[in-house]
Amino acid sequence: MKEFVLNDSPSGKALKIDYAKELNAEQLDVVLHGDGPCLVLAGAGSGKTRTITYRVAYLLEQGVRPDEILLLTFTNKAAREMLSRVESLLAGGVKGIWGGTFHGVANRLLRTYATEIGHSQNFTILDSEDSKDLIKLCLKDIEVDTTSRRFPSAANLLSILSFARNARHGVRDTIMKKHPHFLPLEGVISRIAELYEARKKSSDAMDFDDLLLNLLRILRERPDIRDRLATQFRYVLVDEYQDTNAIQAEIIRLISGSHSNILVVGDDAQSIYSFRAADVKNILSFPELFVGAQVFRLLNNYRSTPEILAFANNVIGHNQGQFKKDLHSMRAGVEKPNVVAAANPFEEASYIAQQVLALHDEGIAMREIAVLFRAAFHSQALEFELMKRDIPYEYRGGMKFFERAHVKDIVSHLRLIGNPKDEAAWMRVLSLQEGIGVATAGRIIDHAVRNNGSLVEILAVQSAGGGGRAAKGWEGTRNLLSKMLPLSKKPGDLIRTVASSSYREYLEAEYPDHTDRFEDLEQFARFADVYDDLKTFLDDVSLTDEFGVKRADEKKQENEEKIVLSTIHQAKGLEWEAVFVMHMADGKFPNPKAMGEEGGMEEERRLFYVACTRAKSRLFLTYPLVTGEDSFMMGNPSPFISEANQKLLEEVHLTRPKPSSFHSRSRAWHDGDDGPTIVLDKMGEKTAPPPIVRKSFLRDIDDLL
């Protein structure tokens, strides 16, 4: 390491900060010697934010003016936090640093230079809702029959156009990659893209993508402006560089081209956003792109125990495209990560719920416990189990399962089978059909529903308040509900009937994440297979939903104790004392769709690595052996568990006492019976079960384990 005298600055003033005392050796090296092109590989929990903050403070103490520093982040919160820390370190006097998100900084620059590309300085910024409204106007401009088949929604069209621009792909390539079912509409979508650009231009408006694209255009086309900005920003620092897309990476390269004082901080092992067009190649190719670049490594981890880090290092070591690095824990050891195989998703949920209560009894706060999962639908059985046991939880990364629009759509269909007079359900079901708006749905209800008693009588009404597209929509509703009637006692079959109907086309056209929603509905059907009667199923779903609303109304205190349920993507950058990574089954994690894409397996492994490194002291990896109602084939754990060094893991075996009574084909537990108590068996030593026995309706599969 280079020597540096810390007691004096170039101005002759004493430094306010004792950097050698405040930083470890790795961090100090970055702060003192971060001139020129620098890549800082900051492992999870290694003090990345601290290092950037002190680097900015050090530059200021060396006489660099605040407005000569450009700090680019991915969230305004991150920028505010860093700048606030710098101000605190230096006791004020740091106003004027250019810090913010890529889009925020681009907006500030375009307010000066937008006239160079045909916009005024008063251009309007379109948010996503504005953009969707503009696309709807473009749809009216083109003469295309959007009624012959489900046409992409404005949200879907915006998703396609945005990804194409950020990834620098053509519209056709993007459709083939993201939405192949829209390929016959490629010509129409390309025309919409042209009209959308024209309307933005005539409106003197830019969407979020334009902020970056137009800044890049200016930097390319106007060397004088590019040189002016490079002269102004003598030092450029970029946080989370592994999450940059092609446009952001080129902006950074051009704006720092004349001086090359570019310091990027990131971790290739945590690059998990390719679906947003982020490209891990940006960080992997940095040393080649910036000749003579220094590469620093922050490997001292202050978050996780040695056992957790040993496993995480082993996991990510199987990736080929990466910078090799092993994190070192600065904490004392606790125990190895636990691997738990459950008979089915219900037993998996029961184990997690019991273990949460046990951890809480040990003194771990609820808010310090998180359950992470690859896809939202993986949490379904757990959400129900937590509600049944009255364990409060906060869901991140979307809405709770029973609050999601497509789940409510399905439940509304089932409600009509149970109660054909349910007008709220009729309104939701009818609104899903093309050609039926609120007014038409109201006429249909008045004409067909209120004048008839049974669902058979209602469905016998052939014309119910309109012709043309409305009549076609009513006919579609009649046909679907008629197919459902003979299945009225089997909720799982009812759900599958709706999910395989024209509703599937509705999801494809309406939502960019339609594939995940299909998975939600299949899991919902499997969940419903436990029930043999519709009434009990709808009661449980309705009461569960009502319970969640009641809890949200009654407990609004900020310090309320809740565990966290989150997708892994939403958990990045966070940490908890105890972390469960659930549904770690082959075919579930890694995601089968991702495995079919270039680099998909390695990104899935990085995602698992991110999940593991969220844990401070305790890490649990759980998976069900059986996920289907009628399939009794033994499943396998995720390959990420199988390929790991098994000596780094502790296997936990679950046993359960056989119940004394069952009912129905599903062999569900009686609501009045005590739920099954899971007994843990670690390394052959049985432990006493947690002293919590609650009501449950968990399925039981004898002797699977």
Image (tube, helix red, strand yellow):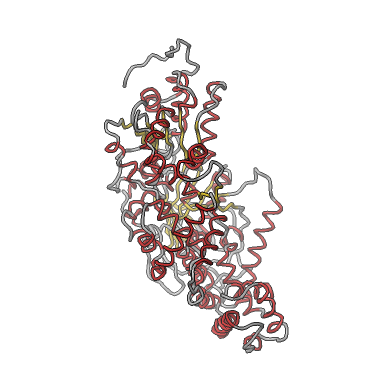
Foreground of the two, 509 or 106: 106
Q: How many marks?
A: 0
Residue 617 visible at all: no
Picture quadrant of residue 474: bottom right
Of the 4 image quadrants, the one containing the C terminus is bottom left
Question: On screen, 647 above or below 426?
Answer: above
Foreground of the two, 166 or 583: 166
Q: Residue at x 51, y 32 (%)?
A: 82
Indicate the position of residue 206 as horizontal and vertical percent values.
Answer: 51, 49
In this image, 432 relative to 117: left or right? right
Q: Residue at x 50, y 64 (%)?
A: 511
Indicate the position of residue 61 as horizontal and vertical percent values.
Answer: 47, 19
Question: On screen, 485 above or below 250?
Answer: below
Q: Residue at x 31, y 48 (%)?
A: 645
Q: Residue furthest top?
A: 12
Residue 434 visible at all: yes
Of the 4 image quadrants, the one containing the N terminus is top left
Foreground of the two, 455 or 418: 455
Indicate the position of residue 593 as horizontal and vertical percent values.
Answer: 37, 62
In this image, 87 relative to 415: left or right? left
Question: On screen, 577 above or below 189?
Answer: above
Indicate the position of residue 497 as horizontal and vertical percent values.
Answer: 51, 78
